[in-house]
Amino acid sequence: MAKVAREMVERAGVNVDQLLELLVKNAAAELNTYYYYTILRANLIGLDGETIKEIAEVARIEDRNHFEALVPRIYELGGKLPEDMVEFHNLSACRPAKLPANPRDIRAMLTVLVEAERCAVRGYTQICNMTAGKDHRTYDLALSILHEEVEHESWFSEFLGEGPSGHFMRRGETSPFVGKFLK
Amino acid sequence: MRRFTEEELLYYDGRSGRPAYMAFAGKVYDVTGSFLWRGGRHQALHTAGADLTEAIKAAPHGPELLAKFPVVGVLQGKEKPCEK
Ligand code: HEM
Ligand SMILES: [Fe+2]
Ligand SMILES: [Fe+2]
């Protein structure tokens, strides 16, 4: 644990235990979506599926990156991950995504996906709100993740016909915002 | 429709197998079936068995997410006039 780092956050008036619980819950949500995207890689097939597969792969890697970037902050603040995967799954901040009954129904698959991204947008907005001006490092991390979650939401909402995202696909490396926490 | 006092509502905290109920704007909702209210706790910040009308103002979502949960009663003293 980074003792003084935690003390600074506490002295700024943040309830660090609550914050830690939220960080762990959101880390669990990331691994859950990473898993869902992995299943999608085997199910986004055919003319409709292949269209989305590549962008889903980018979101898959970025959600895994979010998990990777959250873990050190959890331990710095004196928190820890649960001892087993079942417990971790069960405390996820977002309802774990599940492959629709008909895995050829691309729309249904995308709807599950966009809901997971929307839940993430809400989760990191909350963490930003709790840490803004108080816990600078967690804020920077949560804001960086938030940038990428908003992009994920907009990509898939465009595929669902809700309107243009205004984005191109990523060029170059994944995680343009969170990347600095992974080096 | 059952009328809950705030004290009665306290029992439905979702712990130890008890149902998870919570009140919003005078209505009592049953969120026992929600993954996001497991054990009566929501997002590390809220617990069932209470009136969360004010709490939602600081939440990253509005009350529309409550719509799919069954209403099991009204909160005494907080119900809308037509529900008295
Ligand atoms: C700061 C406090 C809160 C936070 C951080 C929070 C966060 C969240 C998040 C991230 C979701 C998932 C939304 C999605 O899937 O897009 C959610 C769902 C939900 N929240 Fe909250 N929330 C808070 C307060 C509240 C309050 C006060 C209530 C009740 C009055 C409430 C009721 C619900 C309900 C009913 C759902 C849907 C659950 C489901 O679909 O199973 N939340 N909340
Ligand atoms: Fe993510
Ligand atoms: Fe995402």
Image: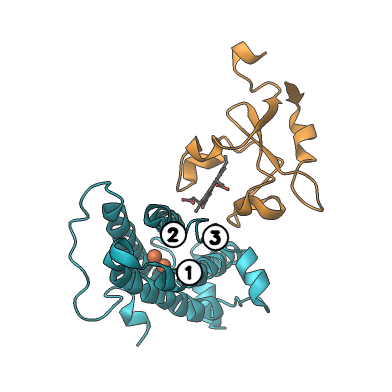
Chain colours: A cyan, B orange
Determine if the C-beta at disc 1 is less than 8 A from ligand 2: yes
* Marks 2,1: beta carbons within 8 A: yes
Q: Residue furthest front?
A: A46
Q: Earlier in the sequence, mark 3 or mark 2?
A: 3
Dot 2, crowdedness within 10 Å: few (<14), some or many (≥20)? many
- Residue at (49% x, 46% y) in the render: B59
Q: Residue furthest bottom?
A: A183
- Report the amino acid beneath label 2: Ala
- Report the amino acid beneath label 3: Ala
- Mark 1 element type: helix
Left or right: where A150 falls relative to A122: left
Report the front residue among B83 and A104.
Answer: A104
> What whole-number distance in Å separates the C-alpha atoms at marks 2 and 1?
8 Å
Report the front residue among A163 and A180.
Answer: A163
Host chain of mark 1:
A
- Residue at (59% x, 62% y) in the render: A18
Left or right: where A5 falls relative to B40: left
Determine if the C-beta at disc 2 is less than 8 A from ligand 2: yes
Looking at the picture, does residue A78 appear above or below residue B66? below
Determine if the C-beta at disc 3 is less than 8 A from ligand 1: yes
Q: Which quadrant is the N terminus of chain B positioned in?
A: top right
Report the front residue among B48 and A118.
Answer: A118
Q: From the image, tell me which residue sits under label 3.
A: A93
- Mark 2 element type: helix
Residue A113 location (% of width, % of height):
42, 59
Q: From the image, tell me which residue sits under label 2.
A: A120
Q: Are marks 2 and 1 on the same chain?
A: yes
Residue B19 location (% of width, % of height):
76, 43
- Report the amino acid beneath label 1: Glu
The disc placed on residue A30 is: 1
